[in-house]
Amino acid sequence: MKTMLGFKGWAGVSAATITIVVLVPVLNLMVPPGSAFHLSDYLVSLLGKILCYAICALAMDLIWGYTGILSLGHGLFFALGGYAMGMYLMRQIGNEGQYRMDMPDLMVFLNWKVFPWYWGWSDSFVLQMLLVVLVPGLLAFVFGFFAFRSRIKGVYFSIITQALTFAAMLLFFRNETGFGGNNGFTDFKRILDVPIATSGMRVALCVLTGLVLIGFFLMARVIVHSKYGRVLQAIRDAEVRVMFTGYDPVAYKLSIWTLSAVMCGVAGALYVPQVGIINPGEMSPAAGIEMAIWAAVGGRATLIGPIVGAFFVNGAKSWFTVALLEYWLFFLGAFAQFAQLRGKKKAMQKDSQA
């Protein structure tokens, strides 16, 4: 582990940990609101949201940067984790909804008398957290099993993942599915019986998200520096040669693909209580494309690069959508082109050196 990160690496991890665990709570909870050093609740929520996106960017780097699998459908796994958390949060509302009924307002509006079978364990935090991991992981495993065994790769794989995401989005838009339709889940009151709309809870969720990101980053570093990670990179560069040496690329691709989906599911579960809403828009094809842009802008196959890219792009988005809303898509497109040209330049340099 020491040789894997080095002094500068561990210093960066330590600085990030201290910032998220100490600095953020102190600036938000202890520094007076009138002070120039006060970190507002809005900025804490924004930081927590971007940290969730950074987890997705890291997951994208594992499959795209290190394995050569470009997915445009990881927004689906992110949203599935968010919906699993949202179901629990909706049950936590109790009878404090608009209709003052024990069932969520979305079901009262549809005149449902009992919960659907898949809502049966939604009042259990532990079971719902298991679903946060199992649902995205199982879907990714089944999808990847058939796709990789069929040797679907390249742009064809990317298009299929986008189609899968779009089909799921259309399904979740339907009210009769029991997931709130177009409105999704919102108006959350508490989590683990603790009020959710307090400064302390916002900081706690932000700190938890930051620690999860740091944990995933360290896990990713171990993976890419292991023999397993070297095989993944070999698959990225020359999959046919890997097959001729006796390795089964399907098993390696399927395992890292499933892991990245689980990471996105965890990110979605952390995202929902901080943002306060989850709807089918989070699994739109555009969401998956943005994840790829975060990884591309920061630099693929670097681990830290996609995290920086997620912070930069989403920080810029937060500013542009307030100050220059009509120019945001132009800005995003420009950076996507910049990332593409930079990637081609690196590929040409690599070919010339070979």
Image (tube, rainbow, N blue to C red):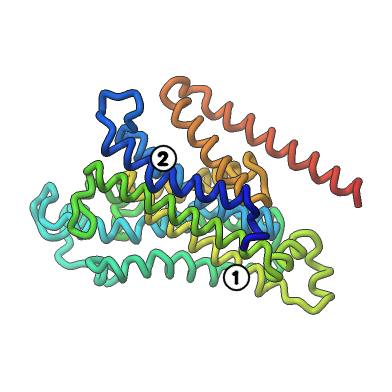
Residue 262 visible in this rendered orientation of the protein: yes
Q: Name the residue under label 2.
A: 47
First in sequence, mark 1 or 2: give its number.
Answer: 2
Q: Quadrant of the N terminus?
A: bottom right
Kind of residue at disc 1: Ser
Q: Which of 50 and 3 is in front in this view?
A: 3
Q: What is the crowding at mark 1: few (fewer than 14 residues within 10 Å), some, or many (at least 20)?
A: some
Mark 2, Cα crowd under 10 Å, few <14 / some 14-19 / many 20+, is many
Q: Does 147 sit left or right of 318 as displayed?
A: right
The kind of residue on which mark 2 rests is Leu
Q: Which mark is residue 255?
A: 1
Viewer-closest of 127 and 24: 24
- Name which residue lies at 62% across and 58% down: 62
Q: Which of marks 1 and 2 is in front?
A: 2
Query: Picture coordinates of residue 241 (x, y %)?
Result: 84, 69
Q: How many numbered dots are placed on residues in this image?
A: 2
Q: Is residue 43 left or right of residue 227?
A: left
